[in-house]
Image: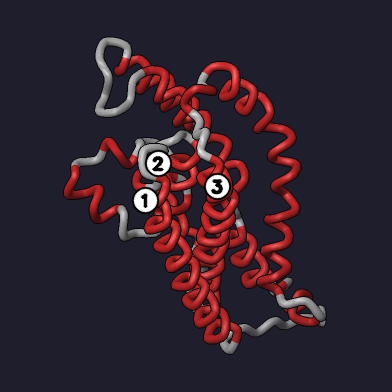
C-alpha cells in the first residue's frame, strides 16, 4: 500500500509541493514507511482468537513458556524472513534514489533502533490487548479491523502526519498510531535533522505508550484467562 500511495502523492506533487513534500520527499517517505512496516508488524490478535475459539490455547498454557511470550517470539521470528524477502529492493531504491533525504546525524541513527523497537512493542501489545477480548466475545477480530482502519489513516502509513491540519496533528501526537509508523519514518528521513534534541520528546511519548498498552494487555490477559475453558477427550 505505501507504494500505491507513493504513486498517488507523487502525481499530486508533480505540479507543486504538497506541504513540505515534493516528489523526492514522498519517494523517501513511502519507501521508508514500507521498510518500517515490514519490521514492526504483528498478527498476534488473530492467532489468539483462533487459539481461544478452537481451544488450542490450552496446549500453550501447559508449556513452561508464557503464551504471550510465545506469540511475541513467533512474530519476532517472522521479521528476518519478511526483511529478506521484501525489504532489500526498497532499501536499495531508498539508498539509490533518495539517499540525500536520509538522516546523516549519528545521534538520530542511534535513536532509530530505539524507535523501531518501541513501534514493534506498541503494535504487538495492542494485538495482545485486542486478542484477549476473545475471552469475552465470540471474536475480537472485528475490533482489530476497526483499530487497523484507524491505524492506517492516522499512523502515517497512508498519509504523512505532517499533512494533517494543525489541530488534528496535535491530537495525533497524543495517540499511539503515529508512534507505530510515523516516528521511525520521520527519524529515518531526517525530519528531525534541524533539531536532534526534538526527537527525545516523541521517543518518551512512544515509550509511555509502550508502558500503557503493556499494562492494558497484562490486565486483559489476567482477567480473560479466568474465563477460558477448553474441553476435549
**Can you say whether 36 is above or below 17 in the image?**
below
Upstream in sequence: badge 1 or badge 2:
2
The reply to whether residue 135 is in sight is yes
Upstream in sequence: badge 2 or badge 3:
3
CA–CA distance between discs 3 and 1?
A: 14 Å
Q: What residue is shown at x 42% (from left), y 46% (from top)?
A: 196
Q: Which element type, helix, strand or loop, lies under badge 1?
A: helix
Read off the residue under disc 3: 112
The 10 Å Cα crowd at callout 2, few under 14, some 14 to 19, many 20 or more, is some
**Can you say whether 43 is above or below 214 in the image?**
above
Q: Nearer the viewer, residue 38 or 166?
A: 166
CA–CA distance between discs 2 and 3?
A: 11 Å
The reply to whether residue 33 is in sight is no
Pinpoint residue 34: horizontal percent, then vertical percent: 54, 35
Looking at the image, do the residues carrying marks 1 and 2 touch, with CB atoms under 8 Å apart? yes
Which residue is farthest bottom?
226
CA–CA distance between discs 1 and 2?
A: 7 Å
Pinpoint residue 28: horizontal percent, then vertical percent: 47, 26
Q: Which element type, helix, strand or loop, lies under badge 2?
A: loop
Read off the residue under disc 2: 192
- Which image quarter holds the C terminus? bottom right
Q: Nearer the viewer, residue 40 or 116?
A: 116
Q: Which element type, helix, strand or loop, lies under badge 3?
A: helix
Pinpoint residue 160: horizontal percent, then vertical percent: 35, 37
Q: What residue is shown at x 81% (from left), y 80% (from top)?
A: 64
Circle number at residue 198: 1
Amino acid at each position: 500500500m505505501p507504494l500505491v500511495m507513493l504513486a498517488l502523492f507523487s502525481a499530486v506533487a508533480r505540479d507543486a509541493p504538497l506541504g513540505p513534500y515534493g516528489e523526492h520527499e514522498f519517494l523517501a517517505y513511502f519507501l521508508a514507511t514500507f521498510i518500517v512496516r515490514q519490521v514492526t508488524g504483528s498478527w498476534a490478535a488473530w492467532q489468539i482468537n483462533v487459539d481461544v475459539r478452537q481451544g488450542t490455547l490450552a496446549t500453550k498454557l501447559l508449556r513452561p513458556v508464557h503464551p504471550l511470550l510465545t506469540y511475541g517470539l513467533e512474530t519476532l521470528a517472522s521479521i528476518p524472513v519478511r526483511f529478506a524477502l521484501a525489504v532489500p529492493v526498497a532499501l536499495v531504491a531508498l539508498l539509490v534514489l533518495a539517499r540525500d533525504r536520509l538522516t546523516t546525524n549519528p545521534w538520530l541513527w542511534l535513536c532509530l533502533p530505539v524507535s523501531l523497537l518501541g513501534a514493534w512493542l506498541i503494535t504487538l501489545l495492542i494485538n495482545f490487548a485486542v486478542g484477549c477480548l476473545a475471552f469475552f466475545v465470540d471474536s475480537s477480530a472485528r475490533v482489530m479491523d476497526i483499530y487497523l482502519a484507524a491505524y492506517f489513516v492516522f499512523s502515517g502509513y497512508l498519509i504523512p502526519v505532517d499533512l494533517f491540519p494543525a489541530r488534528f496533528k496535535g491530537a495525533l501526537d497524543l495517540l499511539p498510531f503515529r508512534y507505530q509508523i510515523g516516528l521511525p519514518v520521520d527519524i529515518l528521513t531526517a525530519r528531525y535533522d534541524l533539531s536532534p534534541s526534538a526527537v527525545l520528546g516523541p521517543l518518551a511519548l512512544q515509550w509511555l505508550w509502550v508502558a500503557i498498552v503493556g499494562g492494558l494487555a497484562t490486565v486483559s490477559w489476567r482477567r480473560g484467562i479466568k474465563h477460558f475453558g477448553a474441553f476435549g477427550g
